[in-house]
Image (tube, grey):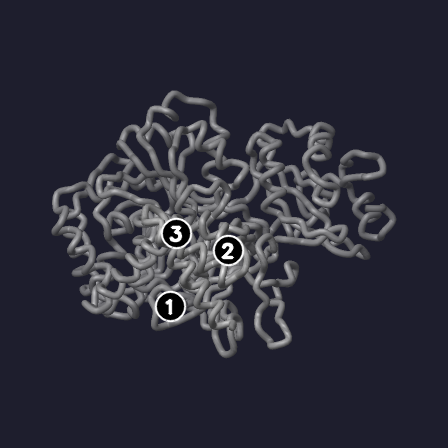
């Protein structure tokens, strides 16, 4: 009976996938199949709402997968694919350097790459060697790693903001034979990209040729880019968003890319007008920084139709599109190394992507239950992970298949770091899956929403507190200023108390007004118990809030010159923390 039901559901799914724009017979087949297979119209409702979206997602998935297999059969690499792009667009602008206005055609870029390749051979570097590239974002950086790749030399793209121990760590872990200052598609390493370091020292993620192609191709097809698009890339080129999702459209698909040396909120829209850009990239807090700028005529005089990136807070989304007149947001989720990337292809506000509810196994990713404080996987009596129901937060995982270029996980230069990101017995016995480390929530239609980076969620007063949600709320109250929210331990108290570090560049923070607004918009358990008022809040090179130092220093006034405040709930106000009050809190003499 179960097999009959499954067959009926499959028939219903097929009918629904053909429902849009086809005959009544298919529609009747869909409804009958679902009814017989599930005895419920719930499946029919979900399928009817999502079939068009899922069809588009399936089309993108198949198109990228077929292209990947074709390139793999031919033994293609990113340099060989770029060579074909050069033949198609020899005199078209490939890269434009905003700092100088210099334009490189595809032919000129290819010639420089060839010069780099010859120079590398002259240095004695051979295929398999690693060379670190340490410089600011500029077209020369692209020519360097692409030229090195032509002779099989792997690049380690180093964050040019790093100094001392972090810099030495990144160079050392890659095994670089040299530093440059200021094969088959699925197997050969192209370069290393370092994780942003929001949770510790950066890890060197391995990027093979097939991964580079996959990321760029998914972005191109998922968000309906065009060959005549001009992309404004203000992101660092040592990061996958700037180098692969941005520059990759130039190398793979022949688009023109404007390379900005460093992001500038005040010059953003003027640059877009100057270079006739139609696509812009964002990451982390960039959209919020743009909203905090004074109104300028240029913000409505551009031709930008698509903003592409990740990390756009739901509280900022609609304000950004309405103020700047950008028709489409291309929000996606995916770390450089992950095998569970998702994309919001139809503009659902706040969602970072989706997975089909009617054909979930086409793209084998899943949200599974975890202890949100320890991030330990929750398992059932068979030892398998427990899938989340719609509305339940869970860890995003992706089933690993090393023979499938869309499902493989190449890991990091460190084998120990690679092992920590793999779990077994997740979907079924003896399988393996990539652990994203991020907590998401899926609604009943399959849309997914980012909730928190692993370990950021904390419990207070018996409730889970989402730092991402509280940060968005507080930032909105304070005119889109930088806010970092995190949990801090208080001796003798269960859970972690919320603490918010707030950037106050003008020295005008008003505790009384802040507390009044917080009472209005946040439930008691989510209100920050401690505040830290700073001239600025640390961010990574990719505009993500950096919390490690803040968490380590906590609310001890002896460890910082920033002003610390404590929420005295009985008095109904925030009070400045001095050494005497700090001691009273840690000794349990002050009630929380």
**Residue nearest the viewer, comparing 511 with 222:** 222
Q: Earlier in the sequence, mark 2 or mark 1?
A: 2
Q: Earlier in the sequence, mark 1 or mark 3?
A: 3
Q: Helix or strand or loop: what does disc 1 sit on? A: loop
Residue at far top of view: 297
When the figure is inspected, residue 383 is found, relative to residue 352, above or below; the finding is: below
When the figure is inspected, residue 301 is found, relative to residue 81, above or below; the finding is: above
Which residue is located at x 65 percent, y 62 percent? 371
Which residue is located at x 60 percent, y 55 percent? 393
Labels 1 & 3 near each other (Cβ < 8 A): no
* Side of 88 relative to 488 (left or right): left
Q: Which residue is mark 1?
A: 175
Q: Which residue is mark 3?
A: 27
Q: Could you tell me how far apart the alpha carbons at marks 2 and 1 are, in whole angstroms? A: 53 Å
Q: Position of residue 579 (x, y in %)?
A: 79, 44
Q: Position of residue 188 (x, y in %)?
A: 29, 69
Whether residue 123 appears in this view of the structure is: no
**Residue nearest the viewer, comparing 551 with 278:** 278
* Side of 418 relative to 21 (left or right): right
Labels 2 & 1 near each other (Cβ < 8 A): no
Q: Which of labels 2 and 3 is toward the front?
A: 3
Q: Position of residue 63 (x, y in %)?
A: 28, 57
* Mark 3 residue crowding within 10 angstroms, few (<14) / some (14–19) / many (20+): some
Q: Earlier in the sequence, mark 2 or mark 3?
A: 3
Q: Which residue is mark 2?
A: 43
Numbered label tally: 3
Residue at far right of view: 589
Q: Could you tell me how far apart the alpha carbons at marks 2 and 3 are, in whole angstroms? A: 14 Å
């Amino acid at each position: 009976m179960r097999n009959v039901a499954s067959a009926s559901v499959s028939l219903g799914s097929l009918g629904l996938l053909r429902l849009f724009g086809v005959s009544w017979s298919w529609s009747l087949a869909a409804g009958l199949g679902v009814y017989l297979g599930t005895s419920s119209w719930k499946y029919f409702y979900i399928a009817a709402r999502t079939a068009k979206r899922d069809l588009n997602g399936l089309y993108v998935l198949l198109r990228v997968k077929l292209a990947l297999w074709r390139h793999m059969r031919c033994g293609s690499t990113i340099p060989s694919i770029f060579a074909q792009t050069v033949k198609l667009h020899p005199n078209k602008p490939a890269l434009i350097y905003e700092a100088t206005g210099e334009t490189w055609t595809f032919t000129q870029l290819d010639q420089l790459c060839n010069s780099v390749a010859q120079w590398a051979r002259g240095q004695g570097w051979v295929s398999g060697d690693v060379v670190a590239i340490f410089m600011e974002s500029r077209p020369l950086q692209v020519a360097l790693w692409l030229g090195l790749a032509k002779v099989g030399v792997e690049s380690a793209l180093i964050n040019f903001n790093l100094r001392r121990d972090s810099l030495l760590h990144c160079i050392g872990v890659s095994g670089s034979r040299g530093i440059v200052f200021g094969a088959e598609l699925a197997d050969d390493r192209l370069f290393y990209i370092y994780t942003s370091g929001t949770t510790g020292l950066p890890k060197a993620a391995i990027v093979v040729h097939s991964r580079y192609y996959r990321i760029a191709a998914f972005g191109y097809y998922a968000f309906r880019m065009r060959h005549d698009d001009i992309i404004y890339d203000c992101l660092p080129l040592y990061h996958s968003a700037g180098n692969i999702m941005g520059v990759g459209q130039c190398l793979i698909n022949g688009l023109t890319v404007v390379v900005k040396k460093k992001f500038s909120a005040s010059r953003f829209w003027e640059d877009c007008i100057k270079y006739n850009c139609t696509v812009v990239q964002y990451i982390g807090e960039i959209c919020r920084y743009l909203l905090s700028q004074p109104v300028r005529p240029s913000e409505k005089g551009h031709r930008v139709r698509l903003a592409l990136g990740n990390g756009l807070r739901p509280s900022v989304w609609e304000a950004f599109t309405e103020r700047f007149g950008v028709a489409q947001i291309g929000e996606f989720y995916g770390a450089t190394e992950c095998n569970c990337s998702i994309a919001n292809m139809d503009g659902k506000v706040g969602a970072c992507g989706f997975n089909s509810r009617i054909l979930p196994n086409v793209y084998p990713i899943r949200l599974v239950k975890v202890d949100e404080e320890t991030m330990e996987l929750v398992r059932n009596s068979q030892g398998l992970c427990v899938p989340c129901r719609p509305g339940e937060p869970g860890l995003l995982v992706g089933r690993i298949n090393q023979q499938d270029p869309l499902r493989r996980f190449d890991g990091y230069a460190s084998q120990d770091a690679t092992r920590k990101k793999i779990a077994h017995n997740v979907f079924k016995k003896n399988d393996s899956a990539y652990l994203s480390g991020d907590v998401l929530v899926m609604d009943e239609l399959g849309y997914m929403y980012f909730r928190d980076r692993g370990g950021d969620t904390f419990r207070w007063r018996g409730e889970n507190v989402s730092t991402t949600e509280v940060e968005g709320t507080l930032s909105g109250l304070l005119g889109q200023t930088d806010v970092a929210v995190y949990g801090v331990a208080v001796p003798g108290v269960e859970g972690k108390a919320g603490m918010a570090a707030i950037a106050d560049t003008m020295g005008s923070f008003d505790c009384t007004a802040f507390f009044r607004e917080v009472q209005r918009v946040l439930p008691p358990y989510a209100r920050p118990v401690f505040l830290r008022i700073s001239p600025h809040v640390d961010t990574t090179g990719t505009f993500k809030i950096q919390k490690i130092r803040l968490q380590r220093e906590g609310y001890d006034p002896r460890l910082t010159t920033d002003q610390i405040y404590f929420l005295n709930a009985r008095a109904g106000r925030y009070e400045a923390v001095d050494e005497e009050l700090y001691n009273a809190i840690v000794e349990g003499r002050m009630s929380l």
